[in-house]
Image (cartoon, rainbow, N blue to C red):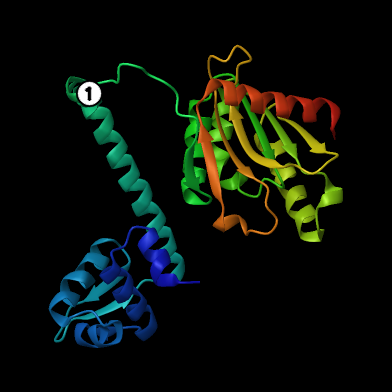
Amino acid sequence: MDVERLFEDLGLSPYQAKVLIALIQCGEAKASDVAQLSGVPRAKVYSVLDQLVDMGLADKKPGRPVRYRAKAPEEIVERLKLNIESEFKRKLTKIEKVRDDLVRILGELYRPSEVESKELIKIVKVGEPSERETRLMFSEAEKEIDIISKVFEYYPKVRDELVDATKRGVKVRILLLGKDFLDERGRRVQDEIVNLLRKDLKNVEIKFSKTTLPLRGAIVDPSYDYTSGKAIFVVEDPRTPLYLRDAAVTENPSLVAGMKKYFDLIWKYESSG
């Protein structure tokens, strides 16, 4: 695991990540020692160390010279979590405060095209980008969510949005790959996820396919009248690792209706409870 990259993904700057790792490695240390181990210029390391102290990731011990010490690993992880939650709430509060003014200003600048049409698909990377799109779709769902997955291993990452959706009365159906097509690990993971789903989601419907599934993804609020709906899907390709694949996102009502038809046919004729 690339810890430095992970720290950056969790909101630390490159310098903050380097200094924190160095501090964890050397224990209590002077700023000059941290600068040498981390490779961060001495002129910068003092301010970076103070930033880590302010973020609750390190302690500062007064004296001559001043010394610094990283928090324990469990405290670092918990503090990173709290900092992310706090920053998210701050930004959410800010956008709610300026929402009306921002909509008005952007509306004055916006020039719609003369002919509006729904883009057929847009492409996003599998991983955090596709998970972000999925969470957004689930949070906006009004009536129906249909999910097609191998074992639904990413469920914990969209759990809150799905739970909230069911509380709003959204119908959730989940089609998982039949156990005959899974290896031992896949069966174990699928069983764990299914137990979580049945515990978390009220009235969730779960079935298992009798055939392989050429697509994976989710369909939200589809309509056979071709008037609404969103979907995200990945085409099955055993030769390519999942993290190297692209996902397709669509709000085209006709395409979403076609995917619903695909889902409904497998759900009714080629799956079992």
Please name whichever residue, 52 or 133, is drawn nearer the observer in this view of the structure. Answer: 133
Q: Name the amino acid type tagged 1.
A: Tyr
> Splitting the image into 4 quarters, where does residue 254 fall?
top right
Residue 239 visible: yes
Above or below 53: residue 211:
above
Picture quarter containing residue 221?
top right
Residue 6 horizontal side relative to residue 176, left or right: left
Q: Secondary structure at mark 1?
A: loop
The image shows residue 80 at horizontal and vertical percentages of: 38, 58
Residue at x-position 47% and y-position 34%:
136
Left or right, 229 with respect to 19, comes to right
Residue with the mark numbered 1: 110
Looking at this view, name the residue that lies furthest to the front. 115
Residue 169 as seen in the image, left or right of residue 76: right
**Which of these two is toward me, 79 or 271?**
271
Q: Is residue 273 visible?
A: no
Q: Residues within 10 Å of mark 1 (few under 14, many from 20)?
A: few
In the rendering, at what x and y percent does residue 165 appear?
Answer: 56, 27
Residue at the image point whose x is 72% and y is 28% from the top? 262
Q: Image point 59% across, 25% down: which residue?
A: 256
Name which residue lies at 62% across and 22% down.
257
Question: From the viewer's perspective, is 80 left or right of 212?
Answer: left
Q: Quadrant of the C terminus?
A: top right
Residue 130 drawn at (x, y percent): 51, 44
Q: From what the image shows, is residue 183 above or below residue 29?
A: above
The percent position of residue 171, horizontal first and vertical second, equals 65, 23
**Quarter assignment of residue 174:** top right
